[in-house]
Amino acid sequence: MGMLRWRGWLGPSRRILSMFLALAMLLSGTLLWLGWRMVRQERELAGQRLQQGRELAADLTLAQLQKSLARAEEEVTALSASPPSEVAKRAGVIAATLPNDSAVIADNGSVMLAYPNHRLTFYPVAPAGHELPASLAAADQLELQDGDYPRALADLSPEVRSKDSAIRAAALMRVARIYRKQNLRAEALSAYREMLDLEDVVVDGVPAELIAHLQILNMEGRTEDARREANELIRALDGGRYAITRGVYEFYRHEAETVLGQGVGQGEEALATAAEAVHARLSDPDSRAGRFLVGPILVLWQTANDRVAALLLGPRWLAQQWPPDLKSTLASYGVAIRLTDMSGQTVFGPPNTPPGREALRLAAVTQLPWQLHALTVDPEAALAPANRRQNLLFASMAAVAALILTGSYLIGRTIARELALSRLQSDFVSAISHEFRTPLTSLCLLSEQLASGRVAGEADRKEYFGVLARESQRLRRLVEGLLNFGRMEAGTAQYRFETVDPAELVDAVSREFEQDTEARGHRIEIEARKDAPLVRADRAALACAIWNLVDNAVKYSPECLTVWADVERAGEFAAIRIRDHGIGIPAAEQERIFDKFVRGSAAKKSGISGTGIGLATVRYIVEAHRGELRLESNDGEGSVFTVLLPAVN
């Protein structure tokens, strides 16, 4: 029903409303297109800002790295030019500033010194061993050639108590070996454990402590003690505790892993491998200084006075080169720095670089040992401000578009309603003019006849006066109806409520109406139930409402000269029903038929006169009585109007 009412309202003004909506959609579409263009430009600008941020970050980082490398190379130059007596002191000062993945190297070809101590897991050359006494050689002959273990132990007995740690360690190693051959396990373990206390002592190019560890492992087998010993040995090897060559390091580490029954991962070999590369520079007389990469380790080196000095700098050293202001700049642009070697392997920074989101500085151009990549690590976070501005812009555009559409709709609806009201008012004026013209014409014509004395006789004169009275009464009702409707619509109508018998009132109104419409021949049949209750009502107003309903039933029943009026109880209400067998009211018009100036389409087609305020007047009166007005009608089958008024108990 609501949809039908909507279509009925929209129909007369569809062009106007469509025009406004089309204009609003055009404006909204244009606005949204401009917004989309602005958003695209904003995103392009945001992308350009990101690229500019990456370029700036790359340039700042490049300048900082060049500055740091220049300072580090100055330290290497000063170290290589230092007198031998000052090398250790200067190297220690430099090493104190380095992280634990970096070191200082001083190498004269036969001895390599690394600072801080125990930083390298192995060395290019083994430290020189001590010269051993002849007694040890004699003991070796007795053991190995003659198999005379007692005499060999007797010759070694004085050396085991020697104050020279190197001699003592060599003697203990031989004693333990002889005990093992004699299956004296406890005595052999005791000798090896004495060797563990002899730190920084080298026997045959291998630290005595390391030899003792391995032999104890072999004697203890796969026990839990042996596993603890193996783990401790691996930690000592990887911690650079021993000055050994790569071969010794790998052999002893492999033996410890064998005891554990599994590998324990790659050792800390990067710095030691870089130190080997530094040592190799001594054999090239044409190369005096330079910088190169060994895996993740940057080597800065210089040769002077048959000695090479070098800085081995790891990724942690690189991380120390970013001052707070550079870190703040990188963070503000959402940029991370990645350094790669010539093969593309990551040396520093995040491992992956999103394609198209980096600023690249090639090593061939920068003269750095790395390729420098400045990349946006979190593009979404970096673009978050732009996205917020974009969302705000979209929201603003959508709000403006909604306002345009809503405003256009409301304007179009208002104009359509005004036009519809104007048409209704025009119809009303036309109908009122017609309603007034008919009685006025009769009044004028009969008055002229009477005034001119052209009346045939007294009977005609009496008839003329009767017609004049009826037409005057009809004209009076029209004027009073208009005045009453105006007061009701303005809310100034005054009602005097009293107890009224609706059956008696319907009967009185019907008799008066039949007398008024006697010339038309209509008849009103009234059925009043005995249980019809009394009501509180304004007698004149309620009579006006009943008159209008009866008048409507008569006007819209041209083929049926009978109208039925029923009065009965309906629960807590008194029901007054006016029923006809007239032209009926289409369902699409039933909701609007009680609005002012509205007349049914069938009435207009049939040429039935009316003002369009009768049913509106009835509605106002019923509402003022706190009642309800109902309509039941089918097109071409007549109508039933029911007035429900609260009953007086």
Image (spheres, rainbow, N blue to C red):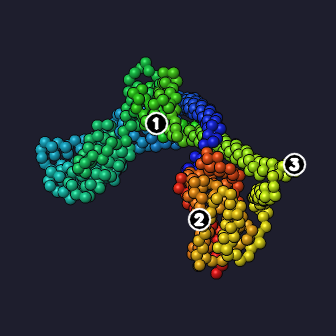
In the image shown, does 359 or 437 lie closer to the viewer?
Answer: 437
Location of residue 480 by image quarter: bottom right
Which residue carries the number 3 mark? Answer: 452
What whole-number distance in Å separates the C-alpha atoms at marks 1 and 2? 103 Å
**Residue that appears at 31% across and 52% down:** 231
Q: Amino acid at mark 2?
A: Trp
Which residue carries the number 2 mark? Answer: 564
Residue 353 placement (x, y as % from top left)? 45, 34
Q: Is residue 649 left or right of residue 125?
A: right
SS at mark 1? Answer: strand
Residue 603 placement (x, y as % from top left)? 62, 49
SS at mark 2? Answer: strand
Which residue carries the number 1 mark? Answer: 348
Crowd around label 3: few <14 · some 14–19 · many ≥20 (10 Å): few
SS at mark 3? Answer: helix
**Residue that appears at 62% across and 63% down:** 523
Q: Above or below — where is 194 with respect to 49?
A: below
Residue 169 placement (x, y as % from top left)? 29, 48
Whether residue 105 is visible to the viewer of this picture, yes or no, is no
Q: Above or below — where is 83 with respect to 145?
A: above
Location of residue 312 by image quarter: top left
**Residue that appears at 52% across and 29% down:** 359
